[in-house]
Image (cartoon, rainbow, N blue to C red):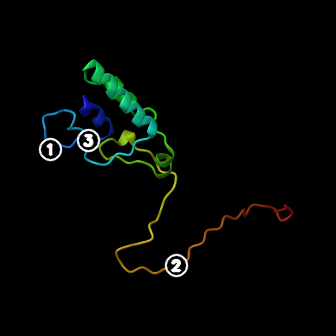
Amino acid sequence: YVEKIANCFGKIKADKKAKDPLTNADTEQLVHISPAEFEAVKALAHRLAEEKRPATEEEAALLRHDRMAVDIAMFGRMLANKPDFNVEAACQVAHAFGVSETIVEDDFFTAVDDLRAASDDA
């Protein structure tokens, strides 16, 4: 039943090392989840373990319902295997290092209201 929960967030790895279904929940890529999603996964896994049954499609779909956290909202989330789970980023970070020679250039951005009348105050 753990595989179905993990499959909600990404593609399950094809190479399964053990027959134990609890250990075969690794996804192909790292998945960032919000605290609310984590709590929902824990609650569902606990309920399924008590009832000794797999998750239904509806239960699995509900895990992705509340997906907002500050870090996910700011930097986004992209999953190639689950595009409906992607979140557009609100900010962008340019890393200050590279693998080739770079030239340091100053870059300035100014926002100017060019439609303001000359008689308007600041």
Question: Would residue 44 be found to the left or right of residue 106 on screen?
Answer: left
Q: Position of residue 52 (x, y in %)?
A: 25, 20
Is the residue 25 above or below the residue 110 in the image? above
Q: Is residue 72 left or right of residue 41?
A: right
x, y percent for residue 105 = 52, 78
Q: Could you tell me if residue 56 is visible in this image?
A: no
Which quadrant holds the C terminus? bottom right
For badge 2, the amino acid type reads Glu
| For the residues bearing labels 2 and 1, Cβ distance under 8 angstroms | no
Tag 3 secondary structure: loop
Q: What is the number of callouts on the image?
A: 3
Residue under numbered circle 2 = 105
Task: Work out whether residue 22 or residue 81 is closer to the camera in this orientation and state it.
Answer: 22
**Residue occupying image coordinates x 42% and y 36%:** 37
- In the depicted view, which residue is nearer to us: 34 or 56? 34
Reading the image, the residue beneath label 1 is: 15
Q: Residues within 10 Å of mark 1 (few under 14, many from 20)?
A: few
In 3D space, how far apart are the residues under numbered discs 3 and 1 (Cα atoms)?
12 Å
Q: Position of residue 1 (x, y in %)?
A: 24, 28
Tell me the quarter of the picture where residue 57 sits: top left
Which residue lies under the disc numbered 3?
11
Q: Earlier in the sequence, mark 2 or mark 1?
A: 1
At x 72%, y 64%, the residue is: 114
Neighbours of disc 2 within 10 Å: few (<14), some (14-19), many (20+): few
Examine the rendering and report whether any part of residue 61 can be seen: yes
Local crowd at mark 3 within 10 Å, few (<14), some, or many (≥20)?
A: some
Point 41% across, 72% down: residue: 97
Going from the N terminus, do you reach mark 2 or mark 3 first? Answer: 3
In the displayed structure image, the side of residue 13 where residue 121 appears, left or right: right
Where, by quadrant of the figure, is residue 87 drawn? Answer: top left
The span from disc 2 to disc 3 (Cα, nearest Å) is: 42 Å
Mark 2 or 1: in front is 1
